[in-house]
C-alpha cells in the first residue's frame, strides 16, 4: 500500500466512513506503527484522533419476528426519544427488489432463471440447465459433452438471492448484487470459479481437485468445506470459514490458512485474520439482517443491495447499532428505527430511490 492509499484509508477512518473490516485493518496497522513510522506518511494529530482505544457503544437492540401481518416487534436496550419520525420515511414502504436472475451464456444469449419452473430446463450445446426439487439450478448432460466446456455466468440483481448446484455437486447460495462465473465442466487439476459480490459455498469433496475461488485479487483454495465470501467492489473482502479448512492466496504473499470460526479481511495490500461472528456473517443466507455493534458504514451497503436504493450523505455519525430483522421487512421500518436510536438525531428523506441522510 502506497502513502496515498494509506492516507485515503485513514481519512475514511477519521470521518467515520470506514466499515468494521477497514477499522480492524487500520487498528492492526497502527498497533505496529512504532517500527514502521518512517515508512508511511501519517500526521501525528490524526494518529491520536483515530487510535483512542475505541469504546463500544450500543444504542439499539432490535429483535424482530415477522408473524403473518403483525409486523415488527422491537426491544430497545438503549432508547433515546425523538418526538417526530420523518414522515416521508414513515410513509415509504420499499420492499426488496424482485428483478430477474439472469444466466448469461456464450455468444450473448441470456436466460431468465427466475422464469424457469421446477422440472423445466434450457439447453446450451448439450448442457441441460434445469431447476431441481430444491429450487436450485442444476446441470445434466446430453451425450458426451465433456469436450465442449462452456462458461456460464449467473447475475443476481439487487434484492435477490439464488442457489446453484455446480457441475461438481458444490452448492452455492449467491447474494444480491453478485455475479459468479464457472465452467459447465471442471477440467484440469483444479475446479475454478470467479466471484464478484457475496456467496456461501458448500464445496463437494474431491481431494484430487481443489476448489479455487478468485475474487478481488485473492484466491481461496479448498478441498471440501463451508464458508462465506463477501467481496463487493466497494468494500474490504471478508472470507469467513464455517467448517473445514481453507487456504488464502494473495499476490506476492505466502498462503494463509483459516480455522473454523475465523475470517480474513483483505483491503488493498493489507491483510488480517480475526475471530469471526459466523452467525452475523451468514445471516443473509437465512433471510435475515443481523448487525452487532455495527456502524452505518457497514449497514447501509447491505440495505442498498437488498432494497435497490442509494444512500446519499456528506458524513455519517459514529453511532453503533445492534439490529436483527427479517429481510422481508419494509425498508421504512428499519430506517425509522435507526432514526429513533441515533444519538445524532439522524434523518432520512426519500427522493425517488435515493435516500438523503442528514
Image: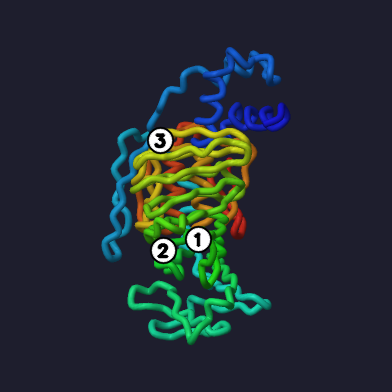
Percent of width and height locating residue 21: 50, 36
Q: Tell me the residue that label 3 is attached to.
A: 293
Please name which of the two marks, 2 or 1, marks the residue nearer to the observer. 1
Closer to the chain start, of discs 2 and 3, is 2
**Can you tell which mark lies on residue 191?**
1
For the view shown, which residue lies furthest in the right direction? 4
Q: Is mark 1 on a helix, strand or loop?
A: strand
Q: What element carries label 3?
A: strand
Q: Do the residues labelled 1 and 3 touch (CB within 8 Å)?
A: no
Q: Which residue is found at the position 46% from the left and 32% from the top?
A: 343
Q: What element carries label 2?
A: loop
Q: Which residue is found at the position 40% from the left and 72% from the top?
A: 136
Q: Are marks 2 and 1 in contact (CB under 8 Å)?
A: yes
Q: How crowded is mark 3: few (under 14 residues within 10 Å), some or many (20 or more)?
A: some
Q: How far apart are marks 2 and 1 (CA)?
A: 10 Å
**Can you tell which mark lies on residue 170?**
2
Amino acid at each position: 500500500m502506497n502513502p496515498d492509499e494509506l492516507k485515503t484509508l485513514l481519512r475514511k477512518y477519521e470521518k467515520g466512513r470506514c466499515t468494521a473490516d477497514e477499522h480492524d485493518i487500520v487498528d492492526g496497522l497502527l498497533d505496529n506503527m512504532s517500527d514502521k513510522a518512517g515508512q508511511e506518511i501519517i500526521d501525528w494529530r490524526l494518529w491520536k484522533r483515530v487510535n483512542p482505544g475505541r469504546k463500544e457503544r450500543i444504542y439499539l437492540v432490535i429483535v424482530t419476528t415477522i408473524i403473518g401481518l403483525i409486523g415488527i416487534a422491537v426491544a430497545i436496550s438503549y432508547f433515546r426519544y425523538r418526538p417526530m419520525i420523518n414522515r416521508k420515511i414513515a410513509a415509504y414502504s420499499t420492499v426488496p427488489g424482485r428483478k430477474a436472475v439472469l444466466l448469461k451464456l456464450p455468444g450473448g444469449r441470456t436466460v431468465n432463471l427466475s422464469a424457469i419452473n421446477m422440472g423445466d430446463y434450457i439447453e446450451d450445446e448439450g448442457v441441460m440447465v434445469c431447476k431441481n426439487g430444491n429450487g436450485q439450478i442444476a446441470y445434466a448432460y446430453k451425450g458426451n459433452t465433456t469436450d465442449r466446456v462452456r462458461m456460464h455466468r449467473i447475475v443476481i440483481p439487487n434484492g435477490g438471492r439464488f442457489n446453484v448446484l455446480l457441475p461438481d455437486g458444490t452448492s452455492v447460495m449467491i447474494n444480491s448484487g453478485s455475479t459468479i462465473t464457472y465452467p459447465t465442466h471442471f477440467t484440469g487439476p483444479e475446479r475454478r470459479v470467479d466471484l464478484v459480490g457475496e456467496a456461501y459455498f458448500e464445496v463437494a469433496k474431491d481431494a484430487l481437485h481443489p476448489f479455487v475461488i478468485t475474487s478481488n485479487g485473492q484466491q481461496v483454495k479448498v478441498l471440501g468445506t463451508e464458508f462465506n465470501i463477501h467481496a463487493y467492489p466497494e468494500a474490504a473482502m471478508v472470507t469467513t470459514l464455517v467448517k473445514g479448512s481453507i487456504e488464502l492466496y494473495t499476490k506476492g504473499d505466502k498462503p494463509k490458512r483459516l480455522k473454523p470460526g475465523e475470517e480474513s479481511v483483505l483491503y488493498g495490500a493489507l491483510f488480517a485474520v480475526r475471530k469471526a461472528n459466523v452467525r452475523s456473517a451468514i445471516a443473509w443466507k437465512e433471510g435475515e439482517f443481523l448487525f452487532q455493534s455495527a456502524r452505518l458504514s457497514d449497514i447501509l451497503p447491505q440495505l442498498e443491495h437488498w432494497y435497490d436504493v442509494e444512500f446519499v450523505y456528506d458524513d455519517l455519525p459514529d453511532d453503533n447499532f445492534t439490529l436483527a430483522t427479517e429481510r422481508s421487512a419494509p425498508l421504512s421500518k428499519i430506517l425509522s428505527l435507526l432514526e429513533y436510536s441515533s444519538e445524532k438525531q439522524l434523518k432520512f428523506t426519500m427522493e425517488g430511490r435515493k435516500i438523503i441522510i442528514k
